[in-house]
Image (cartoon, rainbow, N blue to C red):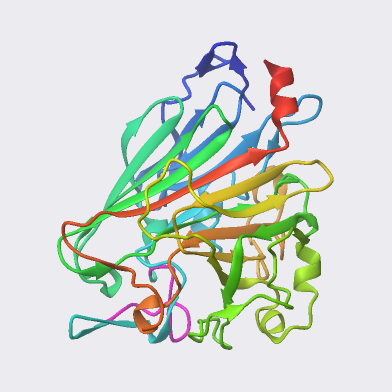
Amino acid sequence: MHFFVEGKADVAIDGSSLSAPASFGNLPDGRTVKVVRIANCNGVEARILTWGATLQSLIVPEAFTRPVDVVLGYPDMGGYLKDSAYLGSTIGRVSNRIANGRIYLDGVWYELIRNCGNYTLHGGASGFNSEIWDIVSIDSRSVRLAMVSPDGDQGFPGTLRVEAEFRIDDRNRLHISYFARTDRPTVVNLTNHTYWNVFGVDQPGRAIDQTLQVNADHFLPTGTDAIPTGEVRAVDASPFDLREPVPISDAISSQDPQINASNGLDHSWVLNGGDLGRISDELPFAAALRDPASGRGLEFHTNQPAMQIYSGNHLNSARKGKYGQHYRARHGIALEPHGYPDSPNQPGFPSIRLNPGEVYKNLTCVALTGVSGAIAARR
């Protein structure tokens, strides 16, 4: 763990540069995966991998106790190569599920790679999470990565040029931004698939003790295949009513058929005030995750119209994660801002189509809360 010289947020106490990429390991074909560390003047630090534009850690300093890492991840490439839970990954070209692994666009059916039963999950068998991204720009507080998805990649039409930016500001906010352009009509629905545990990922089994608040009056029910049915249902009088903070354990202990079918939360909420493509310095509030024991929390703000929330119902890592933990069910909670799932097959859902000349933008801000006193003590 590194803390920073007063007034020099780009230099660690050991003298290493925060913005200098380091080797994180090699792929079987010999290619090297890099890790980049970025931080603000308060000592909040993120580590990003070029493998899958992955958020490997977010470390929060504390005044009198250990620094706390609130992101599930692996200490080396061996874990990520065996990972099937998309820990921290950038997901694309289309996140979530596409029914029957096919889309219809401008009079043409496109058959996609089906990598999960009869549907396409998180972009296909070789999605953006399993690509090495190029580093475009870097400084002590931010890194921008890029990749090109060729025409026909996993069955999707059009060459897609994608950039991902991770940035920490001095208000203790992590900004995750995605941009994409295409040379022919296609569909795009990117997201980040980080699993969060604000108690600290070195403490197993505490994620469901957190409270969850979601700024949404409606959610999208799913069928037995976890694909939305097309209905937009009010959350009233259901475990999906999270407009006020609710312990996650209470929500998932409900006998609601939707909860039982998913063994927990694995649904999209329709965010209030969400506006696809909207650009604003003050993004609409989407959700909050808080740990009552420590007072730490995360607030999510996004320009996306929906948020998939997955309570880690089937986490079961074969490799040890950071701090020697095997990640088990509900060790972390994924909050994924994006467009409506299976939108190409649901005429009532907002479109995720991207045309040439347009710029896709997915902007998310994750603000740390309940840590200001600890951070101030370090100044």
Q: Is residue 102 visible?
A: yes
Residue at (41% x, 45% y) in the render: 280
Q: Nearer the viewer, residue 161 or 358?
A: 358
Question: On the picture, is 313 further left or further right than 350?
Answer: right
Residue at (18% x, 80% y) in the render: 106
Question: On the picture, is 290 further left or further right than 220?
Answer: right
Residue 89 against residue 234 in the figure, above or below: above
Q: Position of residue 202 (x, y in %)?
A: 74, 45
- Which quadrant would the C terminus be assigned to in this image? top right
Dividing the picture into quadrants, the one containing residue 91 is bottom left
Q: Position of residue 321 (x, y in %)?
A: 65, 50
Q: Taken as a whole, is the magenta stretch helix, strand or loop?
A: loop
Q: Is residue 267 visible?
A: no
Dividing the picture into quadrants, the one containing residue 206 is bottom right
Question: On the picture, is 374 further left or further right than 133?
Answer: right
What's the magenta region? 111-123
Q: Nearer the viewer, residue 168 or 357?
A: 357
Q: Nearer the viewer, residue 12 or 230?
A: 230
* Count of numbered marks: 0
Q: Position of residue 167 (x, y in %)?
A: 46, 36
Q: Residue furthest top?
A: 6
Residue 117 in the magenta stretch? The answer is yes
Residue at (34% x, 42% y) in the render: 145
Q: Nearer the viewer, residue 318 or 158?
A: 158
- Which quadrant would the N terminus be assigned to in this image? top right
Q: Residue furthest right?
A: 293
Residue 321 against residue 104 in the figure, above or below: above
Residue 63 in the magenta stretch? The answer is no
